[in-house]
Image (cartoon, rainbow, N blue to C red):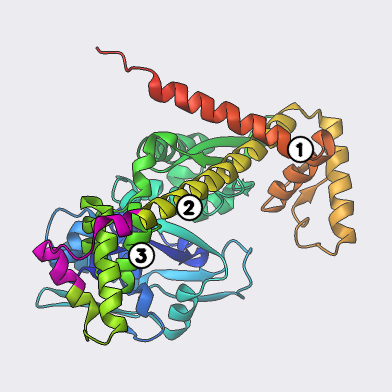
């Protein structure tokens, strides 16, 4: 089995394909993601892509070689339309096409193609979401996977913004009569999907409903998004290589041509030795002594060769570890900065009186109008003190700054310190035995 077929577990997916209005089953939606994952690196250079059924089924989490089931799923992808751009937040003009232009299963091989126009946009999406294949294998419901994909792209801003119910139903493929009543939509679609996402995925969702009118009828829905701290294992892929992507020894082995799986396994076994293998191979290449550095390094690894005094490499390992630790500190601080900003927004938006909210919204609309950002404020309702779409997130940022002002780095320092201290206490607290 070619290693590259299963090594990569994340890819960028154009929001138009995420926001497909067709009603796909769970298997069909998973299949569309896996096919795109496998084809992604070659989208611009080839139109036909192939994958053995024996490889495809395990990645799908499909415990069967039921070719008839795959045929049915492929047929659905060929006949399902994609609209550019359903969410109206990209630069694409409206267009419609099928997800796959061709599909075939023969002699245990699945073959498929994308239209040229679609392939170009799938490879270089202007607005995209990162899809994690490992996460999707955990889901048991098509509505769960659909909601996950539609929410994940907003993770950085912490909120999807408000979606009116008609748009939400279309995004979720829940247009049937059984979902016309909001109570049923919430009971059969929203709550089960929320429960499954929060239990099994790498994000945590909370839902909010906007009501209007005398009867307080729900008119819009939005989802608040944060990291799911209970599911940190999803930061690695199925084979564990993701743990090593930023590791210097891993990168050096990959640069000389060692496969991801073998490089990850070597680093896991002995990081110093992995670095020594890479350095020795680089030296042979510089002297013109080898023609295939990847094969040479792989042979050294499989033979357990001793190629260099460990002390020479240990100094470099220590240096790279210090750099890695500094990078981790920086990344942790930036992650907590985003959490801090989200908490500030929640604090402000939850405490605003109606009159204050309306005034802030009017000020925000005036501010963005003067900046020439009419597209952002198109969903503003000054009478109701509400704004729809991505403008909602920008309004929250604006309101927070007006109410609380800019925060200082010293404030952030205190927040980071408290969070790290709490995390350290939790790690040291023994788990009670039942």
The range drawn in magenta is: 297-314
**Mark positioned earlier in the residue sequence (2 or 3):** 3
Q: CA distance from mark 1 to mark 3?
A: 38 Å
Q: Main secondary structure of the magenta part?
A: helix
* Badge 1: residue crowd in 10 Å (few <14, some 14–19, many ≥20): few
Tell me the element at label 1.
loop
Q: Residue at x 23, y 58 (%)?
A: 273
Tell me the element at label 3.
helix
Classify the position of the C terminus by image quarter: top left
Residue marked by disc 3: 251
Question: How far across and how far down the image is residue 35, in percent?
Answer: 31, 69
Q: Residue at x 45, y 51 (%)?
A: 324
Q: Is residue 393 magenta?
A: no
Q: CA distance from mark 1 to mark 2?
A: 28 Å
Residue marked by disc 2: 323
Image quadrant in which you'd find residue 191: top left
Tell me the element at label 2.
helix
Question: How far across and how far down the image is residue 52, in percent?
Answer: 16, 71
Residue marked by disc 1: 407
Q: Residue at x 12, y 56 (%)?
A: 64
Task: Using the image as rendered, state which of residue 145 and residue 285 is in the foreground.
Answer: 285
């Amino acid at each position: 089995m070619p290693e590259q077929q299963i090594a990569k577990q994340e890819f960028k997916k154009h929001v138009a394909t995420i926001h497909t209005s067709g009603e796909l089953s769970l298997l069909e939606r998973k299949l569309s993601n896996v096919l795109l994952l496998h084809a992604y690196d070659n989208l611009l250079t080839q139109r036909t892509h192939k994958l053995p059924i024996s490889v495809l089924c395990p990645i799908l989490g499909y415990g069967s070689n039921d070719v008839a089931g795959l045929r049915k799923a492929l047929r659905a992808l060929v006949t399902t339309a994609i609209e550019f751009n359903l969410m109206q937040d990209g630069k694409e003009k409206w267009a419609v096409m099928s997800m796959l232009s061709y599909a075939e299963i023969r002699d245990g091989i699945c073959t498929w193609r994308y239209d040229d126009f679609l392939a170009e946009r799938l490879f270089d999406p202007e607005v995209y979401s990162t899809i994690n294949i490992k996460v999707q294998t955990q889901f048991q419901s098509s509505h769960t996977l659909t909601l996950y994909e539609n929410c994940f792209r907003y993770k950085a801003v912490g909120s999807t913004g408000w979606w009116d119910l008609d748009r939400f139903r279309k995004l979720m493929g829940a247009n049937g009569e059984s979902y016309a009543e909001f109570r049923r939509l919430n009971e059969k679609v929203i709550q089960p999907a929320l429960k499954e996402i929060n239990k099994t995925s790498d994000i945590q969702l909370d839902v909010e409903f906007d009501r209007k009118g005398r009867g307080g009828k729900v008119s819009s829905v939005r989802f608040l998004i944060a990291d799911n701290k209970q599911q940190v294992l999803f930061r690695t892929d199925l084979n564990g290589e993701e743990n090593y992507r930023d590791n210097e020894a891993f990168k050096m082995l990959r640069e000389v041509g060692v496969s991801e799986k073998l490089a990850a396994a070597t680093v896991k076994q002995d990081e110093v030795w992995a670095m020594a293998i890479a350095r020795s191979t680089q030296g042979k290449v510089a002297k013109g002594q080898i023609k295939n550095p990847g094969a040479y390094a792989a042979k050294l690894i499989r033979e357990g060769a001793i190629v260099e005094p460990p002390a020479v490499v240990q100094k470099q390992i220590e240096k790279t570890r210090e750099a890695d630790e500094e990078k981790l500190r920086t990344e942790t601080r930036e992650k907590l900065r985003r959490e801090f900003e989200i908490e500030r927004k929640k604090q402000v938006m939850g405490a605003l009186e109606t009159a204050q909210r309306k005034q802030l919204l009017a000020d925000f609309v005036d501010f963005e109008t003067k900046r020439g950002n009419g597209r952002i404020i198109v969903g503003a309702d000054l009478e109701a003190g509400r704004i729809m779409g991505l403008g909602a997130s920008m309004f929250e940022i604006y309101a927070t700054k007006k109410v609380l002002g800019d925060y200082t780095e010293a404030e952030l320092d205190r927040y980071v310190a408290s969070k790290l201290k709490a995390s350290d206490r939790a790690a040291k607290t023994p788990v009670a035995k039942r």
